[in-house]
Structure formats: structure tokens, C-alpha cells
Amino acid sequence: MAPSVPCTRAAAALRMKQIALDNQDRTIRRLRAQLATERRGLAATKKELKETQVALEASHKVIAGLTEIGLSMSKKIENMKVKKQLVRANHVECHQKFQARIHEAEDSMQAQHLLIEALVDEKDSLLQTIHGLQEANNAPAPFDGDWEEEPEEEPEEEEIEDIPLGEGEIDDE
């Protein structure tokens, strides 16, 4: 049996090497399949990353555009506020000038009224003086029958009320 043992041992060793090679071959195929799967996953991940970067750049552009629009609108709103303040100040100034003119006209009318009253009083005084002189001289009254004194009429004073300065709109019409 001695000669067959080495043969069997050699066959067993050979069989063991064959099994080891088969195992290594299966492991290599399994690792290659795993590698191919990993490469496909990596390619898909790279593609998703690229799409995400493109979407991120697009959203950055949108954000930059919206920010620019927001800044532009803020500037316009500030300009509108300044214009509104200027219009309001102009309205107040015009209102004050108008009120000053009204008061000046009222004062002028009042002064004219006082002047008219003074002239009427002076006329009455002169008429009394003339009548007194005529009576003293026994002269006939030159105005008898021809002169009718007009009844004193009070001129109607139109009160111009102060126009209240409101918060309303300015009508340029």
C-alpha cells in the first residue's frame, strides 16, 4: 500500500489545490461583480452629484436675481417714501400760503369796512355841519327834496373758514 498512498496523497493535495483555486475563482468573480455594482453605484452617485450641482447653481442664480429685485424694490419704496414726504411738505407749505392769503384778504376787507364806516361817519358829520350852518344863516337847505340818504347797508361779510390740513390726497385738478 505504500505506493498507493503517495498517489492518493498527491491526488488529495491536488484536489485541495483545485478546491482552493475554485474558491479563489468564485471569490474573484464575486469581488468583480461587487466591484461592477460599486462602479455602477458610483457612476449613479456622480450623476446625482452633477445634477445636484447644476440645480444648486440654478437656485443660486434665482436667489441672486430675487435679491437684486428685492434691493431694487427697496430702493423704489424708499424713493416713493421720499416723494411722499416731499409732496406732504409741499402740501403743507401751499396750505399755509393759502391760509396766509385768506387772512390777508380778510384783514384787507376788514380795513376797507372800517374805512367805509369812517367815511360814512365823516359824511354824516359834514351833513350836520352844513345843516347847522344853513340854520344859522336861515338859508334854505339846498338838498331838501333832492337828497335822499341811502339807508346804511352792512356789507355781507363772507366768512372764509380755515381749510383743515388733513391727511387726504392732494387733487391737482
Image: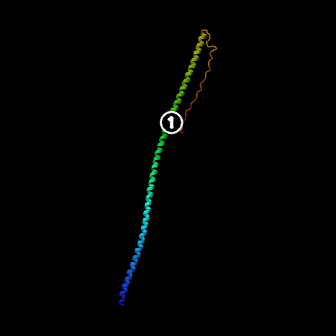
Q: Secondary structure at mark 1?
A: helix
Residue occupying the point 43% across, 67% down: 40
| Picture coordinates of residue 136, whole percent (x, y) | 60, 9
Of residues 153 and 42, which is closer to you in this image?
A: 42
Residue occupying the point 44% across, 58% down: 54
Give the amino acid type for the residue marked by disc 1 in the picture. Val
Residue occupying the point 46% across, 47% down: 72
| Picture coordinates of residue 43, whole percent (x, y) | 42, 65
Residue occupying the point 59% across, 12% down: 132
> Which residue ends up furthest to the right in the rendered image?
145
Q: Which residue position is annotated with label 1?
A: 92
Of residues 46 and 150, which is closer to you in this image?
A: 46
Q: Is residue 49 above or below residue 19?
A: above
In which quadrant will I find the C terminus? top right
What is the quadrant of residue 7 in the picture?
A: bottom left
| Picture coordinates of residue 116, whole percent (x, y) | 56, 21
- For mark 1, does the 10 Å Cα neighbourhood hold few (<14), some (14 to 19), or many (20 or more) residues? some
